[in-house]
Image (tube, rainbow, N blue to C red):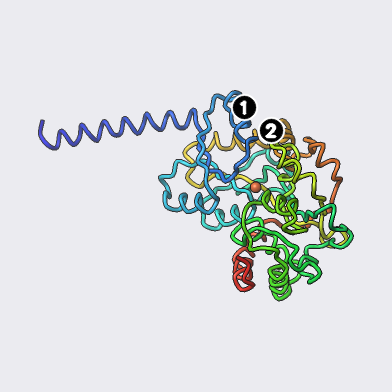
Amino acid sequence: MSNIFKLGFILGLMALFIACGNSTNSDDVVNVYTHRHYKADDELFSKFTEDTGIKVNIVNASADELIQRLEAEGEDSNADVLITVDAGRLYRAQSKDLLQPIQSKVLDANIGSQFREKEGYWYAMTYRARVIVYAKNRVNPADIQTYEELADSKWKNKIVIRSSENVYNQSLLASIILADGEDKAKKWAEGVVANMARNPKGSDRDQVKAVASGEGDIAVVNTYYIGLMLHDENVEERKAGESVGIIFPNQSGRGTHINISGVGVTKHAPNRDNAIKLIEFLSEKEAQQTLANLNYEYPVNAEATKSSILQAWGDFKADNVELYKLGEYNSKAVKIFDEAGWK
Ligand code: FE2
């Protein structure tokens, strides 16, 4: 064979290989980049495969890592779906032109308009409140009713809270900037740093455990972690969960800060139709009920009911700031945390 011939033969084989690869891809799989780290998701993806025959491939990493990866991969990315645990990172992915808008009557019917991006770039799967928890045996809940009060010097050496690198705290501070302005938000961050019982470390669960062990009296955590701890098979986790009370802050003002876990279709999704099917599946009553029951999140589909523990906590007033704004103010929040010395 001449060299030209050999080259043609190899190129032909490659084309055949790529074509086969593509046809398998577009029929049977959906590739998911996800920051979520909860067991309920595995159950839902298995159920989706059972119902549709579409295999779900998972890449698990932080949203920042996944966004970097999507940028690096560009048009060659295999990713179809991006799932994050906050609106800020979905906003960032959208701003970097990594998502595409989709239209879906199913999604419009299942998800309230406050829980979806107006052009269809992303949709909430669930929402969660970032609440204040307190040591039931040491704190009178009437003494702390707002986020702003966390900065009051009466809580000196009493507050345990995680790092400012954590996106949940970044979005909380973004909401405080939006409510109170940058100057007050900075003073607030400085006040909280001055009240910390220890340097920020660990997860939301670790903050609850630190309150249980007496290292601090007050912590700030996402609601579902309390639900997960109260139902954990480990007795230490359960005891820690039981030792704290919950306050939905700012009920007589703007309401409690909420955030979403959400999902969007990637810009170059090779399996776009499957991606939309998966997002629709996650928005249906049954999947929403699984997320509510197994992960103690608030469903965004009004037909699903809250888990019994969330029902026991009662209804609360949520801060209704538009969720994309948490993303817009993320870099300001990070800067304020830095200036305030919040590690
Ligand atoms: Fe989480």
Kindly state the secondary structure of the residue where label 1 is placed: helix
Residue 281 lies, in percent from the top left, at: 64, 33
Ligand 1 lies under 8 Å from the Cβ of mark 1: no
Q: Residues within 10 Å of mark 2 (few under 14, many from 20)?
A: many
Q: What is the quadrant of residue 200 in the picture?
A: bottom right
Whether residue 131 is visible, yes or no, is: yes
- Image quadrant of residue 109? top right
Q: Which residue: 20% across, 35% down? A: 8
Q: Is residue 221 left or right of residue 255?
A: left
Distance between the alpha carbons at the discs numbered 1 and 2: 9 Å
Residue plotted at (80% across, 55% down)? 134
User: In which quadrant will I find the C terminus?
Assistant: bottom right
- The relative height of residue 83 versus residue 294 in the rendered view (above or below) is below
Direction from residue 258 to residue 77 in the image, left or right: left
Q: Which residue is mark 2?
A: 287
Asked whether, in this view, residue 173 is left or right of residue 29, the answer is right
Which residue position holds label 1?
47
Residue 291 visible within the image = no
Residue type for callout 1: Lys
Residue toward you, 231 or 102: 231
Q: Nearer the viewer, residue 192 or 320?
A: 192
Residue 94 — which label?
none
Reading the chain from its start, which is encountered first: label 1 or label 2? Answer: 1
Give coordinates of residue 313: x percent, y percent.
85, 45
Q: Position of residue 214 (x, y in %)?
A: 75, 55
